[in-house]
Amino acid sequence: MTDDRESRQKTVGPAGQDYEVGYGKPPEHSRFKPGNAGRPKGSGKRELSIGDILAEAMSKRRKVRRGDRVVKMAVAEIYVERLIAMATTGSANDMLKVLALIAKHAPNLLSAPEIEARVTYHRAPGSTVQLPSADLWKGSKDV
């Protein structure tokens, strides 16, 4: 067997010096000319999934008027605020959508620790309304 170095061709380079032709060292006449690339059209655009498109659209920032001010907010934040506004003033269907979003993405917002509350009634000066009895809430767990 012959040595690889012996079998490689020698070529004259641009400045007249000899260099070996081999892997990663093409002959001078077949090299790309300055300014020309191997793939002039490039690798093409990658295809985006609907999830990628939604994520990109929801992360963009838009200007929103808040009273007399204009603030920049993420589209997702604007969307959630408007959805909650519709749910609080709109139909039960809107409320279910918001609850489904919360249950899926922020379930900790739906769970709250039980707290003990104490109710104290005060009679307004001059009022004739009777105060409820002190045992009104005793034994009730659904309040």
Image (cartoon, helix red, strand yellow):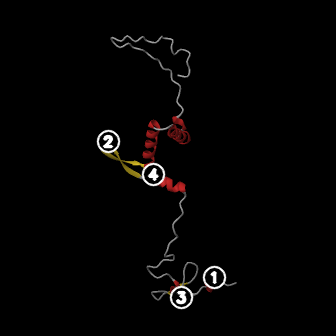
C-alpha gap between disc 2 and disc 3: 76 Å
List the residue tagged with mark 1: 4
Residue drawn at (58%, 81%) of the image: 22
Q: What residue type is labelled 4?
A: Ser
List the residue tagged with mark 4: 59
Select label 3 or label 4 by which is in front. Answer: 4
Which is more N-terminal, label 4 or label 3?
3
Please provide percent x and percent y for residue 8: 60, 85
As helix, strand or loop, the secondary structure at mark 4 comes to helix
The reply to whether discs 1 and 3 touch (Cβ–Cβ < 8 Å) is: no
Q: Which residue lies furthest to the left in this view?
A: 68
Q: Residue furthest front?
A: 91
Which is more N-terminal, label 1 or label 2?
1
Residue 57, placed above or below residue 125: below
C-alpha gap between disc 4 and disc 2: 24 Å
Q: Residue 30 carries which label?
A: none
List the residue tagged with mark 3: 11
Please provide percent x and percent y for residue 32: 49, 81
Q: Which amino acid does label 1 sit on?
A: Asp
Q: What residue type is labelled 2?
A: Gly
Badge 2, how many Cα within 10 Å: few under 14, some, many 20+? few
Residue 55, placed above or below residue 109: below
Please provide percent x and percent y for residue 90: 46, 38
